[in-house]
Image (cartoon, rainbow, N blue to C red):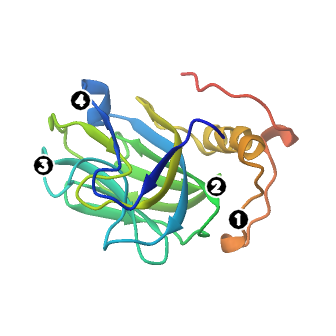
């Protein structure tokens, strides 16, 4: 893997990305990344955070629960996915459509949760922290991407298909879905408008 960042359960184990407007997640957006949880530590171990997501202009945070379910919190509203396997790479994508007020969560290329929420514009100017912040985790993160569009299910599935080759994975058995790559083949993919 080579370029993933490992976090070792310590409070100072995270990557800081300076603020810019693209990271504030206004209008349509998608955040997607790969994460491997080594062990559960703390109450709310963080994948990534830009503020605490507790209200307007307080940023957002993505963490996981004790059963390894991902949670996206912004404006004091949390949207929770389904549990995943520990000690395995998992792909997460959170896509928000402003015109429909819809936050969609995909895990390992499968839509697992849709939440209806109206996110106001957020002017929080703090840094984006990968793997830590107020609650650090024990795992590794890779391929973090922030886009200014809400990816479709087909788009997310393509990103997942590319990662399957990199991480040597098959679809997680947690949700009982069988996996078919988009168009029946694995392919390189770049999102376009």
Rendered residue at 31%/74% (across/down): 43
Specify which label sits upstream in the sequence, 3 or 4. 4
Q: Is residue 78 above or below residue 92?
A: below
Residue 116 numbered tag: none
Asked if labels 1 and 4 touch by Cβ distance under 8 angstroms, the answer is: no
Binning the other alpha carbons within 10 Å of mark 2 as few (below 14), some (14 to 19) or many (20 upward) gives many
Specify which label sits upstream in the sequence, 4 or 1. 4
Q: Which residue is mark 3?
A: 56
Specify which label sits upstream in the sequence, 2 or 1. 2
Q: Nearer the viewer, mark 4 or mark 1?
A: 4
User: For the residue labelled by badge 4, is the local secondary structure a helix, a strand or a loop?
Assistant: loop
Q: CA distance from mark 4 to mark 1?
A: 34 Å
In this image, 193 relative to 173: left or right? left
Quarter of the image for residue 22 reads top left
In this image, 14 relative to 177: left or right? left
Residue 135 visible somewhere in the drawing? yes
Residue 172 numbered tag: 1
Viewer-closest of 105 and 124: 124
Q: Is residue 173 above or below residue 137?
A: below
């Amino acid at each position: 893997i080579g370029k993933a960042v490992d976090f070792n359960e310590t409070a100072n184990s995270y990557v800081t990305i300076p603020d810019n407007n693209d990271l504030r997640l206004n209008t349509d957006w998608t955040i997607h990344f790969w994460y491997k949880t080594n062990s559960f530590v703390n109450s709310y171990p963080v994948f990534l955070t830009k503020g605490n997501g507790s209200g307007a202009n307080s940023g957002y945070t993505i963490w996981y629960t004790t059963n390894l379910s991902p949670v996206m919190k912004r404006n004091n509203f949390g949207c929770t996915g389904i549990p995943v396997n520990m000690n395995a790479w998992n792909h997460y994508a959170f896509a928000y459509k402003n015109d429909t007020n819809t936050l969609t969560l995909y895990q390992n290329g499968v839509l697992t949760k849709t939440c209806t929420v109206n996110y106001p514009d957020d002017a929080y100017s703090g840094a984006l922290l990968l793997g830590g912040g107020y609650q650090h985790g024990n795992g590794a993160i890779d391929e973090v991407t922030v886009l200014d569009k809400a990816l479709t299910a087909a788009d997310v599935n393509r990103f997942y298909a590319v990662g399957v080759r990199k991480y040597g994975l098959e679809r997680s058995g947690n949700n009982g879905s069988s996996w078919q790559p988009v168009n029946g083949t694995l392919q390189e993919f770049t999102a376009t408008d």
